[in-house]
Amino acid sequence: MEMFDQEEYPKDRKLSADENKILDQLGLFGESRRRFIAKISAASLSVLAAPYFSLEAYGCEKAHPITETSEALVNEVQVQLHVNHTVKPLHLDSRTTLLDALREHLQLTGTKKGCDHGQCGACTVMVDGKRKLSCLILAASCKDKEITTIEGLADESGLHPMQTAFLKHDGFQCGYCTPGQICSSVALLAEVEHGEASYVTENIRDIQHHIELSEEEIRERMSGNICRCGAYNNIVEAIKEVQTGKDETEKWQFATAEQMQKASSS
Amino acid sequence: MRPFVYIEPKNPQEALAASVANSAAKYLGGGTNLIDLMKEDVERPAELIEVADLNFKEIKATGKGGFLLGAMCNNAETANHPEIRKSYPLLSMAMLSAATAQIRNMATNGGNLLQRTRCPYFYEVSMPCNKRAPGTGCGAIKGMNAQHALFGWSEQCVAVNPSDMCVALAALGAVVHVQQADSGMRTIDFADFHRLPGSQPEKDNTLQPNDLITAIELPAPVFSDHYYYLKIRERSSYAFALVSVAAGLQIRDGAIAQVGLAMGGVAHKPWKLTAAESFLKGKKPSAQNFEAAADLAMREARPLSDNGFKVEMGKKAIVRALSQAYERTA
């Protein structure tokens, strides 16, 4: 619908069928319709139409995008966030953590908010290849840093080997801690590759490369990722498989049709 | 979290000037403690001055045979630095016992020195706490104090310093390098860096307003062969120490030539066991001497209502840490 001018309307302009329909529904006829139209200035009837043609007419809430104008932000920071090899310019409140920037502003909801206080590890991402807690990092502190989230691990050739291993070994139950667990274990492999020691490493003065991780080492190095379902045994198996490159037999299997039949008949 | 202005100074001078210009400003390093405390409404800075990217990131040898650890190096790269692991394994071991891989990747060395206590009364803003809100009283002294101090506490505060790194630095006898508001440099002996609560528990250390930590200096290594950091906690990883002991020994001709001994989880500051150190110097590294040193170290303990267990635990921990340090063959 076109804009109209208060002066020339309604005398010179004929209403369209749609416009008439709207005014009919508003219960405005004859003189009152003319007076009403004269009162609304510099506006289009489409404004009135909106409710009738939107989801709200059917009782659905309409989603309003959050406007990110400088007026809406008290302490605005501008951040070029490099995430999974894509650069996104963002205007954020200075309080925004990396976690909230990823989830609320970039719709990368793979990274999970667990405790939001650095105690559970669900928000683990990699910043310049190092595993960190996105809930305790300000987005503003991440300028010029390369961030890798769970969404950035798979490539055209398929899932990251750690993702495949978590699937194979059933390294999760509810799955909420899983993106953090996987990011953490991927970074762990790089740390081990660099010969980095942990608190349980026997002789930390002896710097070894390509350490083969004992179960104790894996548990200590993964202690920052809590799993409330208790899938720890399977997580350890998954990490062990990827780290050693040796096929670990999974501790579970889907039952075959034959086995199912046998079970139900016995 | 309350609103704050975020600024990124280009150099230390700009950071210091920004701090001088706003008394409600705080320096932001790794954020592992400060951001959490801001979410809890314990810390309420009006401005954050990003210092993590300032150029204090080197780990290098000093001319005096020691090492300088940049204040903005993170705990992980410091603990796993090949030279630090080789010459100061006690420090590496203590640092690796702390927190988690993720937190060690974030936390800076300077920030580690400034960690606030984990006393639950300090964290819970509805509770009285002289450290958080001077004059409101101490919730812990007659409350739940199993985690709290044995030494050096006052009626105003019974909280403990939570750092592991600092316990090792106390045993090693480090020095803190500080840049002042006028850009002048000064050094603080590690033993004088943290303070006891006294009547001003809100002050954790002896830094002056605006002071910026630039580096931690380690003296020439003497405990690289015989070292152990024992950390006793309620689960085997990712928990603060109930009691921890950093023990370093230098053995010459079958006797203890030098000894560094400090405890964590027992005082408002890393607790250097000076009397036990003097006792051990020149003596044979025997179980008997280790036990006598531990008795001496715990003699001044003043347990609270719930933490009496720490006295016996402390004695055993000292003996065990010294034994492990001695038995360790390089």
Image (cartoon, rainbow, N blue to C red):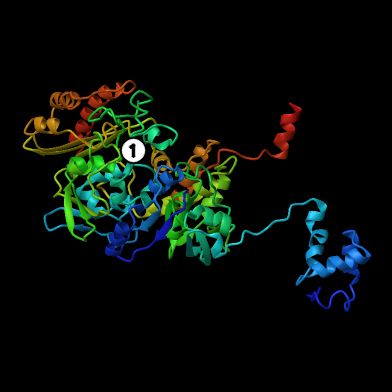
In the image, is B123 to the left or to the right of A234? left
Q: Nearer the viewer, residue A132 or B147?
A: B147
The correct choice, above or below, for B79 with respect to B301 in the image is below
Q: Nearer the viewer, residue A103 or B117?
A: B117
Residue A203 in percent (x, y) is at: 27, 43
In the image, is B190 to the left or to the right of B54? left
Q: Residues within 10 Å of mark 1 (few under 14, many from 20)?
A: many
Residue under the image location 25 percent in, 49 percent down = B85
Q: Quadrant of the C terminus of chain A?
A: top right
Name the amino acid, label 1.
Answer: Thr
Residue B269 in percent (x, y) is at: 25, 37
Chain of the residue where label 1 is placed in the rendered structure: B
Residue A259 in percent (x, y) is at: 70, 35
The correct choice, above or below, for B9 with respect to B310 in the image is below
Q: Specify the quadrant of the image occupied by residue A158.
A: bottom right
Count of labels shown?
Answer: 1
In the image, is A11 to the left or to the right of B27? right
Residue B264 seen from this side: yes
Q: Secondary structure at mark 1?
A: loop
Residue under the image location 28 percent in, 62 percent down = B12
Residue A128 seen from this side: no
Q: Specify the quadrant of the image occupied by residue B180.
A: bottom left
Q: Nearer the viewer, residue A215 or B122?
A: B122
Residue under the image location 29 percent in, 49 percent down = B79
Residue A76 in percent (x, y) is at: 49, 62
Q: Quadrant of the N terminus of chain A?
A: bottom right
Q: Specify the quadrant of the image occupied by residue B183.
A: bottom left
Name the residue carrying label 1.
B117
